[in-house]
Amino acid sequence: MTAESHVVVSAEHSPVAGLAHDARGGISNPILGMLLFISSEVMFFAGLFAAYFSTRANFVDANGVKEWPPSEFAHILNPFSLILVATVILVLSSVTLQMAIWAIRRDDRRGFLRNMAVTFVLGIMFLLMQAYDYTLLFHDGLTMGSGPFGTTYFTLTGFHGAHVFGGVIMLGVVLYRGLTGQFSSRHHDAVEAASLYWHFVDVVWIILFSILYFL
């Protein structure tokens, strides 16, 4: 195996390879900027989680019962329903996005565009399913004004949905630029940056889903 082919194989299978495209071996500005942005987002969501657990720990209903979620909403949040399908779709979108990354690293433009398009569609599907799930919750009586539980639930999932929406726009821009031939194995920092953000959004949702529906 030549030195060049060894580098290509390593870059394809390493989770952090391909992030440093600077000629001097450092992390490029788009990647560094995204990492710093994600760091701020970690603190933002950490604050939301802290508020959620604080509210949960101090919640007592009108009858003096310390129960979370409140009994009138406990039957509504079924993890084995539409929201589970939406979760699988979002996780799958991270898989297809990583496949797109591997494709562009080896200059497989067709594979990159195919997987990026699938990721974009899956992201839209998640948003539509979350919106539909909201309508079902509203119909069952759970709204933003349904006490501390309703407020914290829709605050957490709503902010996450806004981040997914931003990520879908980002993926759309990357897909458009890919269609115009702007990316190659040597120049795809924007793709790497978008993938970091999307994987972050995916991880946050898995944590959210676990906390809200199982804990």
Image (tube, helix red, strand yellow):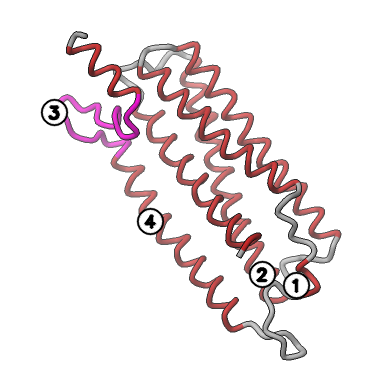
User: Are discs 4 and 1 less than 8 Å apart at CB?
Assistant: no
Q: Which callout, 4 or 1, points at the residue further toward the start of the chain? A: 4
Disc 1 on helix, strand or loop? loop
Q: What residue appears at the point 51 percent right and 66 percent down from the top-left corner? A: 49
Quadrant where the C terminus sits is bottom right
Q: Residue at x 79, y 64 (%)?
A: 75
Image: 60 above or below 30: below
User: Over which residues does the magenta segment extend?
Assistant: 13-31
Residue 31 tag number: none
First in residue order: circle 3 vs circle 4: 3
Kindly identify which residue carries mark 3.
24
Which is nearer the eye, 77 or 173?
77
Element type where label 3 sits in the image: loop
Please name the residue that numbered disc 2 is placed on: 151
Let me know if residue 15 is in the magenta part.
yes
Q: CA distance from mark 3 to mark 4?
A: 27 Å
| Mark 4, residue position | 40
Dots 2, 4 in contact, CB < 8 A: no
Q: Amino acid at mark 2?
A: Thr
Image marks 2 and 1: residues in contact by CB distance under 8 Å: yes
Query: Extreme right residue here?
Result: 139
Residue that extends furthest to the left in the rendered view of this protein: 24
Q: CA distance from mark 4 to mark 1?
A: 30 Å
Sequence-wise, which precedes: disc 2 or disc 4? 4
Q: Nearer the viewer, residue 11 or 167?
A: 11
Residue 35 is situated, as x and y percent measured from the top left of the image, at 33, 45
Dominant secondary structure (helix, strand or loop) of the stretch shown in magenta: loop
Q: Where residue 69 sits: x, y (%)?
A: 70, 72
Which label sits on residue 146?
1
Q: Earlier in the sequence, mark 3 or mark 1?
A: 3
Inspect the magenta stretch and tell me whether residue 21 lies in it.
yes
